[in-house]
Every structure is written in structure tokens, then in C-alpha cells.
Image: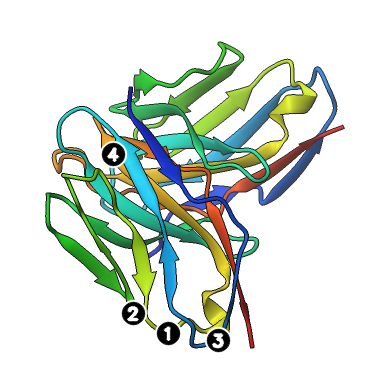
Amino acid sequence: DAGVTQSPTHLIKTRGQQVTLRCSPKSGHDTVSWYQQALGQGPQFIFQYYEEEERQRGNFPDRFSGHQFPNYSSELNVNALLLGDSALYLCASSQTGVSNQPQHFGDGTRLSIL
Amino acid sequence: GNSVTQMEGPVTLSEEAFLTINCTYTATGYPSLFWYVQYPGEGLQLLLKATKADDKGSNKGFEATYRKETTSFHLEKGSVQVSDSAVYFCALIRDDKIIFGKGTRLHILP
């Protein structure tokens, strides 16, 4: 049973570019959440997708957008990259209908902005 | 608002020492509480959880008890191993959104 998978593992971009990160949820899960983890910090909630719509959002600018596909996989897009966007981006999945259950995390995509 | 505060690291212990990592939370209502662990170069793994007051979560020798009266969820282990070296995150969940503490780096010396 595959867990949460993310791609790519590492990515290097320059300021002003755009990036797309991908996530496949754990089998049986239908909800995907994205988190940003800056170096030495705890993960910060970006947004959550369910039924192909953004269900809730954290305190991140509109440069951060996402998408969920019918197979429950998800993408995180970041436009106009800034140096401060350098971080580990984590995807987590869960099953709607089971309230406040722990989420399962992937190994993350490490994004470096030059 | 909802928040989690945990002791700052790094924490350095010798193998077989007793471990405590303090965690307190602020939240409306009664959130579920978690401890996640992050090994170098990896994502987060759920270590243990507790969903209501006085619940004790346990896994791999680690324990934490949900204390509503002190709004705490301290992580303990009686005898740590070198393989326990990692970063530990205390977290709560409200409305399906996880709020994490800043993490505590644990380093165990052989």
C-alpha cells in the first residue's frame, strides 16, 4: 500500500520563475493538504483540497495556488518565486468523514530559489 | 487563536537516558493532539496521538498524556537510543488543519 508520494524530490529555481509540485495521496484518502516548512521551523499550513476545490487556506499570498484532480492527486503552483519561498514543501493526505484524524505526510519536495 | 509551544532544542542526551520534551497548547474546544517525528532528509511520521483529555498515546517506547488542566502534551521516553535522534514536532488539529510547534531537535550520544 503506497503512502503519500511527492515529486520531484529536489528542485532549483531562480527568482521570478514559476514552479509546480505534485502529490499523490495515500490509497483510500481523498483530501490533500499542503504545508511549507522553512529551515529550522515547523510546517505551516498553505491550503487543503477536497472534491477538486480549495476547502480552506492558510496565511499565504495568491502566488500560491493549487489544484486537485479526479483521482485525488494534487498540484501546488507557486508564481513569481521569491528567495523566501525556499523551503521543504510537504503534502499530507487524509480521509474526509473522519474528523480531526492525523494526516499522512510524504517526504516532501525541497525547493531552492537562487 | 490556536497555537503550540514546545521546548527549544537542541536536546543532547546519552544513550539510555530519560527524555522529556515539553509541549503546551492554546486552542478553542478540545483538539486532538499529536507528536510527529522527522528523521534527516525525510517527511513527517506520526509518532503518537491522543484525542481527548487524559488519553495516553504511546508508540516505540514514547508516551504522552493529554492534560486538559495544564493544556500540555509532554513527550517522554524512559531509555533513549541513538536511533531516536531526530526532530520532534508537537501538533494539534482543528477543523482538519494541523498546527505545529517549531520542533525540538534531539541528539543522542552513544
Q: Any mark on residue B61, and which?
A: 2
Give left or right: position of B2 versus B65: right
Place residue A93 in its image quadrant: top left
User: How many numbered discs sit on the rendered protein?
Assistant: 4
Most distant residue in the top direction: A62
Measured as percent of width and height from the top left, residue B96 is found at: 27, 34
Measured as percent of width and height from the top left, residue A78 is found at: 64, 23
Labelled pair 3, 4 in contact (Cβ < 8 Å): no
Task: Identify the residue shown where x is 65% and y is 61%.
Answer: B41
- Report the front residue among B14 and A77: B14
Task: Identify the residue shown where x is 49% and y is 83%.
Answer: B17
| Residue placed under numbered mark 4 in the picture | B93
Say above or below: A72 vs A62: below
The numbered mark 3 sits on a residue in which chain? B
Labelled pair 1, 2 in contact (Cβ < 8 Å): yes
Tag 1: residue type? Ser
Measured as percent of width and height from the top left, residue A54 is found at: 37, 20
Other-residue count near label 4 (Cα within 10 Å), few / some / many at <14 / 14–19 / ≥20: many
> Whole-Å distance between the Cαs marked 3 and 4?
32 Å
> Whole-Å distance between the Cαs marked 1 and 2?
8 Å
Tag 4: residue type? Ile
The numbered mark 1 sits on a residue in which chain? B
> Whole-Å distance between the Cαs marked 4 and 2?
23 Å
Q: In the rendered structure, which disc, 1 or 4, sits on the residue that comes first in sequence?
A: 1
- Image quadrant holding the C terminus of chain A, namely top right
The numbered mark 4 sits on a residue in which chain? B
Q: In the rendered structure, which disc, 4 or 2, sits on the residue that comes first in sequence?
A: 2
| Residue placed under numbered mark 1 in the picture | B79
Task: Identify the residue shown where x is 12% and y is 50%.
Answer: B53
> Whole-Å distance between the Cαs marked 1 and 4?
29 Å
Residues flagged by tags 3 and 1 on a common chain: yes
| Residue placed under numbered mark 3 in the picture | B15
